[in-house]
Image (cartoon, rainbow, N blue to C red):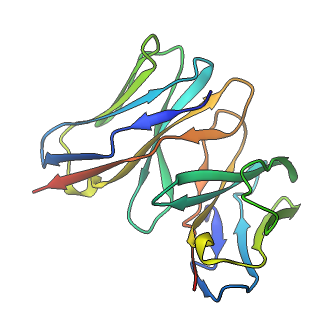
Amino acid sequence: GEDVEQSLFLSVREGDSSVINCTYTDSSSTYLYWYKQEPGAGLQLLTYIFSNMDMKQDQRLTVLLNKKDKHLSLRIADTQTGDSAIYFCAETLLGFQKLVFGTGTRLLVSP
Amino acid sequence: DAGVIQSPRHEVTEMGQEVTLRCKPISGHNSLFWYRQTMMRGLELLIYFNNNVPIDDSGMPEDRFSAKMPNASFSTLKIQPSEPRDSAVYFCASSPGQNYGYTFGSGTRLTVV
């Protein structure tokens, strides 16, 4: 079945690294995504990873995928106050187009 | 590209009134999705279209909700009659195809009093 879970809240200091975690239950996931939602805005696609990869790096963002444990993480290096937002992980399932979103993790970056 | 355009940005209406939310997807995107976001339920997929045809409407809460996509550049989500529990942010998103991810609009914040 479809179930994507995330911790609700993460607080870090500016300049530290942030790690946001996500677990999913469906082993037929094909692509996994990270979206960012700033206050009053829609969701913005940050990055994605194909299910046969275990790591993807994009500037300050690193995505790690542990397919055996169905665990996805997003690491933000040198976190800035502008990174404060809600981060959603999402998966697409084999043969389906719809995205299943997690509950979202609210990241608060303090100066 | 202007992105996915939703209107209105904010809507306040009285219980029992009809509400129509509008969406213009990105040109060339053949899939369109309507989501609802609330604190209690998070993001819920209401319905999605592929090439203007509704594919999955299992998330539409009840018969008061209806969605149409008369052409590739326009979709509406209608609630009639509206109820206070419909208060939420409604997002439209479009996608060029499977596994490409979505582009979201800025949402319509609906308040039913």
Question: Which residue is drawn at the image coordinates 72% and 58% (left, top)?
Answer: B61
Residue furthest to the bottom in view is B14
Give residue B74's position: percent from left, percent from top. 80, 66
Question: Which residue is drawn at the image coordinates 13% and 40% (left, top)?
Answer: A16
**In this picture, is A69 found above or below A6?**
above
Q: How many marks are shown on the rendered structure? A: 0
**In this picture, is B20 found above or below A62?**
below
Q: Is residue A108 left or right of residue B41?
A: left
Q: Nearer the viewer, residue A66 or B86?
A: B86
Tell me the quarter of the image containing the N terminus of chain A. top right
The quarter holding residue A92 reads top right
Q: Is residue B101 left or right of residue B98?
A: left
Give residue B72's position: percent from left, percent from top. 84, 58
**In this picture, is B24 found above or below B84?**
above
Q: Is residue A17 left or right of residue A51?
A: left
Give residue B52's position: percent from left, percent from top. 87, 53
Q: Nearer the viewer, residue A28 or A61?
A: A28
